[in-house]
Image (cartoon, grey):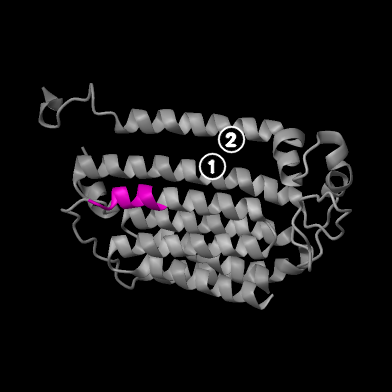
Amino acid sequence: MIYFLCLVLLCVGIYGVLRKRNIIRMILGLIIAEHAINLLFVLIGYRLNGRAPILSPDGPILQMVDPLPQALVLTAIVIGLATTALLVALAMRLHGKYGTYDVARIRELKG
Amino acid sequence: MVELYILLILMIIGAVGALEMKDLLSSVVALGAVGLGLSFTFLVLKAPDLAITQLAVEILSVIILIRATLHKDLPEVPARGWSGGTAAGLGFAVVFLGVAFLCIPDLPPFGEPLLKVAGHYLEAGLKETGAANLVTSVILDYRAFDTLGEATVLFTVVMGVLAVMRAVGRKERGKADE
């Protein structure tokens, strides 16, 4: 069930990418979809009543959560920031050239 | 468990708000709320490294997006009317969620990870890498090439943004045809 809510979030993001006319809104939708996928990975690696995967000198810790998805998502979060920065830079260049963020109007103003 | 559901529902509300609000700046702030909720969710899911990183990254991306929405002459973008496209979008959502609902039982059930590979990391991580934090041992030792690729992507993006935003050496708009 919790997976399903996560996929609903992904759906909201994809809807934003597909149906919005404002470029900034499309970028927001992409970021939301990214968040949903990152969350899905970590959810799959979660163990009920688990502990964070950090060892302690006091003794062995049982029931750790899966560290592998966490490491992969750590990479994905940073790459998400990088793609966001590049997309926003391109959107700002488009705004500088055409004076609008509206994709339909940018299509009209071609050339 | 209950707090996870509450946080996820708040995130979905924030996401819908980010896409539907009239003002672009409010949308960006709503996206910041979604990112904050995600950070708290990571904390609940026992991923402190991810929570810290997510918080820092969200702050940065909100700053970048606010920079893009700061233009004073930002014209209102009219929303698309209710049309076949919107209906197709909602139909896509229904089909996607239906298929997802059928597929969810094939995932490992919530709270019981597979630990096929990570079981070895949990047992031998300290002995083989010497890092007490096992996430660190994975990203900097077992999967260090992954992190190298990440650094490459970051460097490439910096160069790309510099090339896109560069003002020097670009022709003026009216003179481009001469």
* Residue for point 55% across, 29% down: B152
User: Dot 2 corresponds to which residue?
Assistant: B150
Give the quadrant of the N terminus of chain B.
bottom right
Residue B67 magenta: yes
- Number of marks present in the image shown: 2
In the rendered image, residue A83, in percent from the top left (x then y), is placed at 47, 42
In the rendered image, residue A12, in percent from the top left (x then y), is placed at 49, 66
For the record, the magenta segment spans: B62-70
In the rendered image, residue B80, in percent from the top left (x then y), is placed at 30, 66
Q: Amino acid at mark 2?
A: Glu
Residue B51 magenta: no
Discs 1 and 2 share one subunit: no
Label 2 resides on the chain identified as B
**Which disc is residue B51 wearing?**
none
**Which disc is residue A79 wearing?**
1
Q: Is residue B49 above or below residue A79?
A: below
Q: Secondary structure at mark 1?
A: helix
How dense is the environment of label 1, judged by Cα within 10 Å: few (below 14), some, or many (20 and up)?
some
